[in-house]
Amino acid sequence: MEATARVRSSHTPGAARCEIQVDATPPIATWPAPQGGVRDCLGDAVANRAYYAAYHAVAHLAQARGIEFTSDKAYYQHDRFADDAYRSGILDVEGARDLRELYAMRIKADYLDDPVEFDEADLAAELAQKLVTKLLP
């Protein structure tokens, strides 16, 4: 299933909405656009996707090395994933630091009121590209 993110807006000032939709299903999440408008949704989307690009690269290597998912879950626990990947030798100190930074930006993007700024989104994209390129040459 392919996920798409799109921005929907109306002609009424302040009524722009951010929406996540999967294929042709009804939206799975919708919320008012931040005070700065639809533009603010973009930094959040970049930070989220940058984190998950890095997460999946690290998870791929963990699976290839036979490292089990977190307890009874079908994923690795996000809040300790960078440290676990460092301890298992998948990430070096710099890689673990970068993954922690990406995780913090994803939390900001997905759960906090302040939007991820464009300079932060640029940094997230750079960190993710660096990690993925290093891990999956």
Image (cartoon, helix red, strand yellow):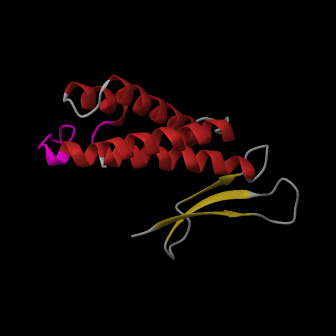
Residue placed most toward the observer, 16 or 66: 66
Residue 8 vs residue 124, the one in the foreground = 124
Viewer can see residue 117 = no
In x, y percent, where is residue 116?
Answer: 64, 38
- Residue occupying the point 37% across, 46% down: 133
Residue occupying the point 51% across, 46% down: 48
Q: Is residue 46 above or below residue 4?
A: above
**Residue 131 pos. (x, y %):** 39, 40
54 inside magenta stretch: no
Instruction: Locate the N terminus and report the quarter of the image it occupies.
Output: bottom left
**Which residue is at the far front?**
137
Span of residues in magenta: 63-77
Q: Position of residue 68 (x, y in %)?
A: 15, 41
Residue 93 visible, this angle:
yes
Please give the name of the residue rendered at 88% of the width and 56% of the height, measured from the top-left corner: 13
Task: Based on the picture, tell me whether residue 68 belongs to the magenta stretch.
Answer: yes
Q: Residue 16 is drawn in which quadrant?
A: bottom right
Left or right, 111 with respect to 100, comes to: right
16 vs 43, left or right, is right
Q: Is residue 10 above or below residue 122?
A: below
